[in-house]
Image (cartoon, rainbow, N blue to C red):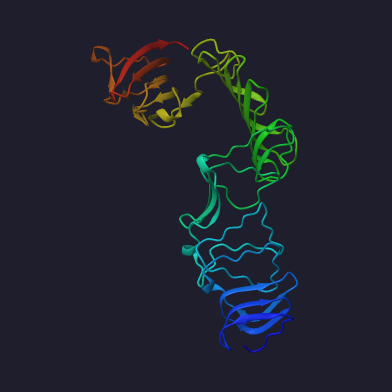
Amino acid sequence: MSQTKAQILQGKGTANTVEGLTASGIVTASAFDVGTTIQIGNAGVITATSLDVRTLGGDINVGGAVTISGNLRVDGTQTIVNTETLDVADKTVGIGSTTNPSNTTADGAGIEVYGGADGNKSLLWSQTGEKWILSGGALSVGSSITGGNIHGTDLDVTNVNASDRVLIGTTDEGHASADDLTIATSGHTGMTIRSGTSNSGSIYFSSATSGGNEYNGYIIYNQTDDSLRFGTNENDRIRISGIGSVGISTAAPRGTFDIGDGNEVSSQVDVAAVDIDCSKGNFFRKQVAGSVTFTISNVPTTSVYSFTLLIDYSSGSIAWPGTFLWPDNSAPTLTTGKKHLVMGVTNPNTSNFRMSYLVNYTS
């Protein structure tokens, strides 16, 4: 041994190896190779460049505090800290640190809380998708989440009130306190979902440039009459009643489909040339002052379609499409200088139109 200082030193063995050592003072050495036991009183101190206790084969038990001013390295498969709190005074707890750490070595690393019969709860990193996976419990955020994207099967936001909102893309939705979810830019252009009262809910679409209730469109459900309303600029445009009746520009549809008083199914479409374009409406008008051959285009293939053609007939001849099927296979004879109504209807099972007509109106 290089140096040994002690008030009392008791041991046996050769000059370089101490098989048993008992000291009540200070023991200083460049290295210790201990075959059995080191026993030091409460006031004793061991100072060594290297202290190798791996060959002891047992446990090291310390009744008081242990202070390490340098680095602590533990080589093994499991380290147990049997205490309620683990404090890291500096900054970081590193997980998955190896000689060459990578996304592969980090796969499956994280924090796991043992739940016994209730199952474990864990927050683990997954290489697939490069994401954190939370399992066995929920995530509760006391203030805010800041980041790029939030992915998950469920996003559960509870206890929403005047001060608890879900805001996406904006820091201040600028609307009523009942708003539950606002997806908007900072200028409030976007969508707001509002729970309202306990028996209703609504979705508002806005292009407002400042805070307030500048809503350009909305969808509102009201449980009181079980109705669904679609509107723009604070006016109802479509109302679906509780029994399924649909009203356009009327809040009280009188039948299965009500377009409201003073409204037409479609406006009159003037046939510029000779083609009846079904995509433009149902009521067409054509002034005939010469020979024409009508065609028909854009016939719906998935629904029943009917049209009416008003002919203001001055002169000439008229030829009809071959898909027009007339009663008794006879097209109408039209008188010049008068007006005539020609009607046709088809369905998805055929491309033919069954035709009818009312002719020779004087005005």
Examine the rendered structure and indicate whether residue 286 appears above or below residue 168: above
Dividing the picture into quarters, in which one does residue 12 lie?
A: bottom right
Residue at figure coordinates x 59%, y 16% from the top left: 250
In this rendering, the answer to whether 98 lies above or below 272 is: below
Q: Residue 157: horizontal and vertical position, in percent?
A: 63, 37
Q: Is residue 137 above or below residue 93?
A: above
- Identify which residue, 69 or 304, lies in the foreground: 69
Q: Residue at x 73, y 74 (%)?
A: 44
Dividing the picture into quadrants, the one containing residue 154 is: top right
Residue pushed farthest left?
A: 329
98 on left or right of 291: right
* Image-based side of 8 in relation to 53, left or right: right
Residue 20's place in the image compared with 78, above or below, is below
Q: Residue at x 62, y 15 (%)?
A: 224
Residue 128 horizontal/vertical position (percent): 45, 55
- Quadrant of residue 8 within the rendered picture: bottom right
Residue 153 in view in this figure: no
Q: Nearer the viewer, residue 236 or 163?
A: 163
Identify the residue shown where x is 40% and y is 15%.
340
Where's the N terminus, which quadrant?
Answer: bottom right
Which x, y percent locates residue 355? 32, 16
Q: Along the line of sight, which residue is nearer the eye, 226 or 315?
A: 226
Look at the image and tell me whether residue 331 can be seen.
yes
